[in-house]
Image (spheres, rainbow, N blue to C red):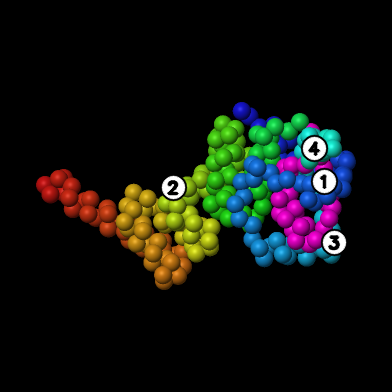
Amino acid sequence: MRMKDDAAYIPTKYDSVFWIDVDRIMPNPCQPRKEFNEAGLSSLAESIRQYGVLQPLVVSRSEVEKPDGLESVYELIAGERRLRASRLAGLSQIPVVIRHGENNLTKLELAIIENLQREDLNAIDRAKALQKLIEEFGISHAETAAKVGKSREWVSNSLRLLSLPEHMQAAIVGREINEGHARPLMTLNDRPLERETLFKEIILKKLPVRAAERIARSIAQERVHKHHRKSPEMVK
């Protein structure tokens, strides 16, 4: 399925803004973001206390049956950080724009693209969000890049992070290593023992990226030399 051109929706001055109770907004079940930086949320909450919520959240509305009749409930489409920070700030109501007729795929699309446009999304959640976007909508790396305003190479390189074992991905999420360290590790994907040794060295010795790259290059060169020594042509 192809995505609509208005997928990365941002509220404008022409939208009607409504104020609704914070407690009536349910989280987006399609939210791809797995971690929210507590310090960042606290900082945003303080800003909201001083200046309010400057950009409305985007929600969908549905009616649910209650003992005393129908009640409107709201499901978040975009604005998870603002919602969490507003709760931290103690707000009872929050401004929203209500979108109608959104299906789950559209909600997923909006949530993914909003997260991908944030600079503080960790590299693994970003890669998983890109992967989900590609799988759910059947689009190419180039089409995905156009949607998120990045290059095709950026999309492809981000997705490569998912080739690392789970514990290495967890180390990136936990900021024990960074995305720069991941590159030399991925060059050793076909040599898992050496990759694991390098990973442990990075952690234990707190190796900078360039040092990790040098070690990975050294391992690769050693592999080439061994190949030449074993080659029948070289023996002849």
Q: Amino acid at mark 4?
A: Lys
Residue picked out by circle 1 = 96
**18 and 63: which one is in front?**
63
Q: Residues within 10 Å of mark 3 (few under 14, many from 20)?
A: few
Residue at the disc numbered 4: 66
Return the disc, 4 or 2, that comes first in the chain's sequence: 4
Q: Amino acid at mark 3?
A: Tyr
**Tag of residue 163:** 2
**In the image, residue 202 lies in the stretch drawn in magenta:** no
The residue that disc 3 covers is 51
Question: Which one is earlier in the sequence, the residue at label 1 or at label 2?
Answer: 1
Instruction: Find out whether residue 90 is within the magenta segment.
Output: yes
Residue 59 place in picture, x, y as percent: 77, 42
Boundaries of the magenta span: 74-100
Q: Position of residue 68 (x, y in %)?
A: 84, 37
Tell me the distance, in whole angstroms, between the alpha carbons under discs 4 and 3.
Answer: 36 Å
Q: Nearer the viewer, residue 96 or 131?
A: 96
Q: State the CA–CA distance, disc 1 to disc 4.
A: 23 Å
Query: Nearer the observer, disc 4 or disc 2?
Result: 4
Residue 115 in view of the camera: yes
Q: Taking 158 as reference, is 175 above or below it? A: below
